[in-house]
Amino acid sequence: MKEHTHHPQPFTGYQKFVVAILAFLQFTIILDFMIVPPLGAMLMPALKITPAQFGLVVSVYAFSAGISGLLAAGFADRYDRKKLLLFFYTGFVAGTLMCGMVKTYETLVLARLITGLFGGVIGSIVFAIITDLFPLEKRGRVMGFVQTAFAASQILGLPAGLYFSNLWGWQAPFFMIVAVSAVAGVAIVMYLQPIDAHLKMKIDRSPLHHLIETVSTSKYLLAFAATALLSIGGFMLMPFGSAFTVHNLGIHVDKLPLIYLITGLCSILIGPLVGRACDTFGSFHVFVFGTLVAIVMVVVYTHLGVTPLLWVIIVNVLMFVGIFSRMIPSQTLMSVIPEASSRGAFMSVSSSLQQVAGGFASILAGLIVVERPDGVLDHFEVVGYVVLGTALVTLFMMWRIYRVLPDAPKASPGVTPGGH
């Protein structure tokens, strides 16, 4: 794909609403996924479970989400995307509500499994909707805004969730997510218009055949591999981030919300800027920049010893510049790859691979890192080297993908991108 630099086009009023509701929806999904690890200190004694059992509570969501994404792929292009979104979002909210009501370890694992089964598909539906409704020259900015949900979950979600859990117990954040999600659900029902232009392209294959054809299409395979590797690199540092900050960097646990807050605020600014850069300079060029920044900052971060709070915040912010400058352009490039008739299936398989790769990355990091009796983590720099290696391989893969992509049409066939 030969991307051209140009002045980004403005959004219509309806497009602005779609971007806002999708970003808000992603906020609830990401928050639900991210809230569990910080609750470990309260959850483990409350349910009398071991760190290994808690690890299963965290990872079962990722693996069930991966399975459901694969199972849903065959059906993803057979329904109005609005109806599909509402079905899975309702299941996600029900699973989250169950998480807040459980009393035992076994039922919590089951609740997380149910939440993952429904929540894991939503991200792929969101990205299929973005690709359906927005032409390529606007897509970078849309991806940038939607990805700010990750930062918003850090700023608003994690501190608020931890605050409420300190007041009312570890169940409180789940009830908070249910309340916020209900608002998003009502907005989708009332204002999001049907997204069914892809249904005009008849799919004669059975769901199983549609899935098999999607995962065996040669031009998709490299994209799937790059997606999985991106996720492995992205997820390896996350599970031990707070423990590393407290025990290795010497930052008091009370300062963690401040780090989340400042990093998140900066990320909210970074996301849209990266999206605009993708639309202006080309997604691949931004991805190269992000990879170089990420490599440098991951090596710096994983080699830190006891460090002043200000320097920890600066390193975290710069690391997020690298992360966002890889995440947003890679998703923008990936959105050009699938045919309109298999877009939902492609996104579902990609989402499934992201979830499974993320779960695998957490396990791999756990095998590398060793915790001393005083809580200090050994071999964290080895995790950094693994992330560096995945970043270099992914850069080569994205270059290959970029070279073979055709010039993208201004809009998808049968779709009116300009709004309603």
Image: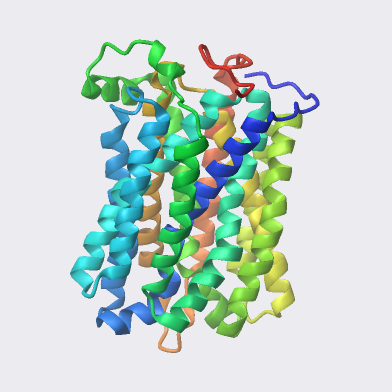
Is residue 75 placed above or below 307 in the rendered structure? above
Residue under the point 41% across and 44% down = 354
x and y, in percent, of residue 30 in the image: 47, 54
Say how many tags the image has.
0
In the rendered view, tell whether residue 74 sits above or below residue 359. Answer: above
- Quarter holding the C terminus is top right
- Please state the horizontal and vertical placement of residue 63, each as a whole percent of the image: 30, 51
Query: Could you say which quadrant of the image residue 296 lies in?
Result: bottom right
Is residue 250 in sight in this rendering?
Answer: no
How is colour applied across the structure in the image? rainbow
Q: Nearer the viewer, residue 389 or 276?
A: 276
- Residue 291: image quadrant is top right
Q: Nearer the viewer, residue 363 or 64?
A: 64
In the image, what residue occupies the spot 36% across and 27% down?
345
Residue at 64 percent across and 21 percent down: it is 418
- Tell whether 339 sits left or right of 153: left
Q: Nearer the viewer, residue 276 or 56?
A: 276
What quarter of the picture does the N terminus occupy?
Answer: top right
Judge from the rendering whether residue 250 lies leftward or rightward of residue 359; answer left or right.
right
Q: Residue at x 28, y 25 (%)?
A: 211
Res 36 → quadrant: bottom left
x and y percentages locating residue 237 in the rendered image: 50, 62
- Residue 258 placement (x, y as % from top left): 65, 75
Residue 81 can be seen, yes or no = yes
Using the image, determine if residue 361 lies above or below residue 263. above
Which residue sits furthest left?
106
Residue sitting at the far right:
7
The residue sitting at the front extreme is 190
